[in-house]
Image (cartoon, rainbow, N blue to C red):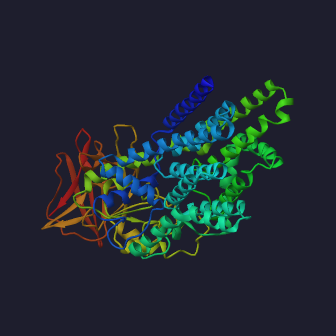
Amino acid sequence: MKNSKTLLLFIILTSVVVLCVRAYYFYPYYADDSYITLRYAQRLLDGYGLTWNNGIPVEGYSNLSWTLLMAGFGALGVDMELATRITGLALSISIIGLLAYYIKTRYNGDPRIVAIVLAFFSICGIVSVWSIAGLEQPLVAFLALFAIIKLFDFRDYKKKSNLILSSIALGLLCITRPDGIMLCFILGTYLFIINKNEVKKAILLVSQLAIFPLLFYFGQLAFRIYYYGELVPNTALVKVTPSFYHSWIGLRYTLRFFRTNSSLILITLGLVFLLYKNRHKNLKLISTILFFWFAYLSFIGGDIFDAFRHHFYSLVFILILLADGLYEFFKSNYYKKWNKNILVVLLILSFSYFVYRQFTDSRYMNVKNLNIAYHHLTLAKELKATFSDVQPLVALDAAGVIPYTTKFPSLDMLGLNDYYIARHKPKTMGKGFIGHELGDPEYTLDQSPDIIQMDYGVREPVRYIDSMLYINKRFKENYRDISVFAKADNGYNYEGVLWFNIFSNKVGIRSVGNKVIIPAYYFKTTEEVFNEFKDGNLLLPIEPNQEFELLLPYRIQINTIYTELVGVEILHSSEGKNTRITIKNNSNEKKYLKEVVVK
């Protein structure tokens, strides 16, 4: 017995180590949407409530409990980004504990079952990525698994406290994800069915299970109505757009999950045969949960993120099926009759292929190789250092790290955090990427944003709103594409394009007394030159003998024109209603120009 406990502990600790190493493999990946949660949490701490901007409040988050939890860490002085990572990893480790507990209490802690189940969990790319990516998926999976295990504990051991614990977990799940209510309905129905011969008892038990889901769900609904004046969150208006196209994309999302994790899926499906044959009491419930979850993901169109974050939830239920199936297999005649060496070889080959897919599948490698949020973090820090005194309005598609880090007033052009856009949908709705289909160019330009970023910083349009802006007359007249470069000590440099409002009194050409100040980043040459952030300024680098021009769409009466740099020649001329200004570096060294001043 002592050796058995030691072996079980060794397997658990090994799984924890593997999970942590795998998570570190994907570090420092962080989902841009995680910063949306942190912006709400930070504004709550700053006294602005659960809001995105000043003005009409919108519920642009779908993870209330996670947002409040991070705000709690922030109130204690803990860096909230770090808190999301540590909490996510701790919850995934806790899931290891829950799976081991389930196998120990049902199957005497059979080390073969524990080792196989935890090996699949700890090496899986879904777990590795989303344990550290900053979103609520580890909490969702933990609460769902805890709820069903405690319900099984109540069913099998008749201890009422387990029913209450399951209810608490389900309640928290309801305010962690809006779709958490699905599991509540399924488990409530299951509890009623297994007690259907005693109707009064069944109703009483279901009522007890429903206490905390009803309390939390309707509590949040009451808060939403009172605080936001809405029945559904902004996220639902933006993301829930049923269509045949979205259903097809959602189905492909799940099929891709099956393919990437085919070893695990095929082994589990093979064992389901035994569970069905032996009428295992968990099979119908777990199968129902997975069926409705897969159908739901198809309905909403899957997810835009790599690494299958919504299947973290699926994974824990699949592993319960795997554990149940392995137990049935090990006690069956199939296991007794088959050559054990062959079985071991087959298992090793299957698991080896599983590991291979976790390290090579593009949905995981994209996460490993592309860390867009951290490149954006570099840009955000420089924007804050350069423009914090004027607080420009920034309009963007990726509404995470830049709004959170800069604390600038921000316009979410995709509508997730905007009242108007979420309620004015284009005719093309249902034919594009989920959550990235909205946008109103006229509304966006009416807000007079000082800076616009398309997608992650591109010149050519990517999203629907980018395309609509790109052909808009006002946009063409008022905005100029500015190539920018921000250097980072950690290597996550940013290089991209921002669109600056040339008429903005914050980042544009502005009048100060009898002077007109022209930021140097508006000047262009025949080749692309990246303006560089340096010491709180955005500067134009000019090589020796290099020449730049700016054509203004109006005439300026120029008496004197100068810069702060020696060796830079400035010429100007009037061309009809326009003014052309030319600057040239006549020195033998590279110059960094901040602005040109006209009197």
Q: Is residue 54 left or right of residue 218?
A: left
Q: Is residue 422 left or right of residue 594?
A: right
Q: Quadrant of the N terminus?
A: top right
Q: Is residue 287 left or right of residue 335?
A: left
Quadrant for residue 506, please give it. bottom left
Question: Quick check: 193 above or below 126?
Answer: below
Q: Is residue 258 left or right of residue 38?
A: right
Question: Quick check: 120 above or below 78?
Answer: above
| Relative image position of residue 286 (x, y in whole percent) | 69, 53
| Relative image position of residue 199 (x, y in whole percent) | 69, 68
Question: Quick check: 337 above or below 472?
Answer: above
Q: Nearer the viewer, residue 459 or 115?
A: 115
Q: Nearer the viewer, residue 375 or 49?
A: 49
User: Does the image show residue 537?
Assistant: yes
Question: Quick check: 528 above or below 264?
Answer: below
Q: Exactly how many numbered labels are in the figure?
A: 0
Q: Residue at x 72, y 39 (%)?
A: 263
| Relative image position of residue 426 (x, y in whole percent) | 54, 74
User: Does the image show residue 360?
Assistant: no
Q: Nearer the viewer, residue 512 or 67?
A: 67
Quadrant for residue 246, please give it. bottom right
| Relative image position of residue 412 (x, y in whole percent) | 42, 65
Q: Residue at x 43, y 73 (%)?
A: 419
Q: Quadrant of the C terminus?
A: bottom left
Q: Residue at x 21, y 57 (%)?
A: 596
